[in-house]
Image (cartoon, rainbow, N blue to C red):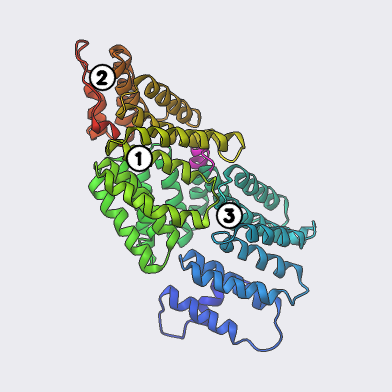
Amino acid sequence: MEFNSFVLSDAAPMGHPLIVDELLRRAEHLVDRRRGAIDANQVELLVGLGRQFDTEELHEDSRRILEKAYKMSRSLVESSARAKAACALASRASELDLPRATALIHEGLALLPNKPQYALDRVFCLSRAREVRDDSGHFLSALELAQEALRELRASPFDSDLMELHVTMDVAEAMREAGNFQGAIEGFAQVSTLITKLGRENTQTAGTLYNNWGVALESAGQIVPAEEILRRAIAVNKAAGSDHAESPMLLTNYARTLRSLAKYDEAAATAEQAVQMAKRHGVDQAADQAVTLLADIYIDQHAYARSLAIQQEVEPRLRRHLPPDHYVFWVMLATRALALVGLGDEEAAISNANRAIVLGENAVNRRQADASMLAGVYLKCAKVRLGTRRAAAAVNDAQRSAALMQSVLAPGTASSGLGDAYLTLARAFQMTGDLEAARRSAQRAVDHFSKSVGPDNTRTRDAREIAEMPMGDRPFASQRDLRH
């Protein structure tokens, strides 16, 4: 049974086009009015509705409907419907109650015998398990679950191009979140080929693909193609007439790309728009992600007090639904350290930077995170050392950042992130007095920036200035070195 067919044919009154939200609510009403004993079809319809509400970023509605589906499924004997209801609810419950979400995943998988007829149900539950592991910040184990789901699908008699599309996209997204940006980019490119083959280039799934692909490109420092792909995501959503044509998450991702292009004012305006839109729609997680990005952008704009204030505002909210060792907290410590440097509190800045590195290294040692995820933390900490005139430590952190970024990129890949690491390293070498090393590092930065953000970008010009510096010059690091 195809859920979307049910919605399009049964929920909409003839001759009356409906917006997506209203369409879904009418479908929910029709399901609730079904008479007779609860059956598996009714539960499956509710699961489909809950998942669709989630896709539309109506998370509270999604959670409410999936709770209903789960409670109804308890009276069924069909293990398939019971398992899917448990696993679907887990992916929504994880934001509020990770232990319960984990228990629901175990419950769902335990209900499914290892028989071919249950293969697609196991794929569904493994995919939801991946989402729960994502929410807990355990990205490497989330990737393993996504890969297991793909193996299960390909070994089943029910494999299809459409299922391949969704599960392969899950694997690519899990790679991105685990820090394997190059693998994610290649995976999304494969999905793009498949989505074109299926004639679905202008669907909601395509919009999600382009969004995630753009984020992977931006994370790998390939900014120009990232902006192009994210613009495509916006265009697809607008063409589809979605109520959330420029969703808060998509706007946040686009703002991040604008920041990488050093368009700080435009990035701030876009991220602030994302915050307001997320608050209007009640999408708290999207609002928090946009606020976290704004903390970085305000540092770029030298608005250090403003950055520190919104970090202090968002952290308690994040701690309510994320585990204490989640990567966002060690990244935020490094961001806070940069703000504190700008405000002149060097002792607190160094303390926060050191703690960020310790927490990040501990997470890597526990295999909670890939080492590449530390690259951005080391880069921020290198800028903290620069701002506090600790030149040797800045060199060490910038070199560590560059090495970690290089480890996940294909040879010859141009990356704005690597450019930023080499520019920071050049400034650190300037401070030590090693001007030849400064010029070499700056030239590497120029090479990366020229190909990733353009030869006329502000960051490219800053790097070129050092690369072409006469040997007698030794400009001292300034507050601008805290910029992205």
Q: Which mark is residue 131?
A: 3
> What number of labels is visible?
3
Residue 166 % position (x, y): 57, 55
Q: CA distance from mark 1 to mark 2?
A: 22 Å
In the displayed structure, 15 sits above or below 391; it is below
Question: At x 35% / y 55%, what residue is drawn?
Answer: 251
Q: Start and end of the magenta stretch? A: 178-186
282 vs 175, nearest the viewer:
282
Q: CA distance from mark 3 to mark 1?
A: 27 Å
In what element is the residue under mark 2?
Answer: helix
Residue named by callout 1: 223
In what element is the residue under mark 1?
Answer: helix
| Mark 3 or mark 1, earlier in chain | 3
Which amino acid, by three-letter code, is at mark 2? Ala
Residue 435 % position (x, y): 28, 13
478 vs 88, nearest the viewer:
478
Q: Quadrant of residue 449?
A: top left
Residue named by callout 2: 467
Nearest to the eye among marks 1 and 2: give it.
2
What crowding class fits label 3: few (fewer than 14 Cα within 10 Å), some (14-19), or many (20 or more)?
many
| Mark 1 or mark 2, earlier in chain | 1
User: In the picture provided, is 346 more to the left or to the right than 14?
Assistant: left
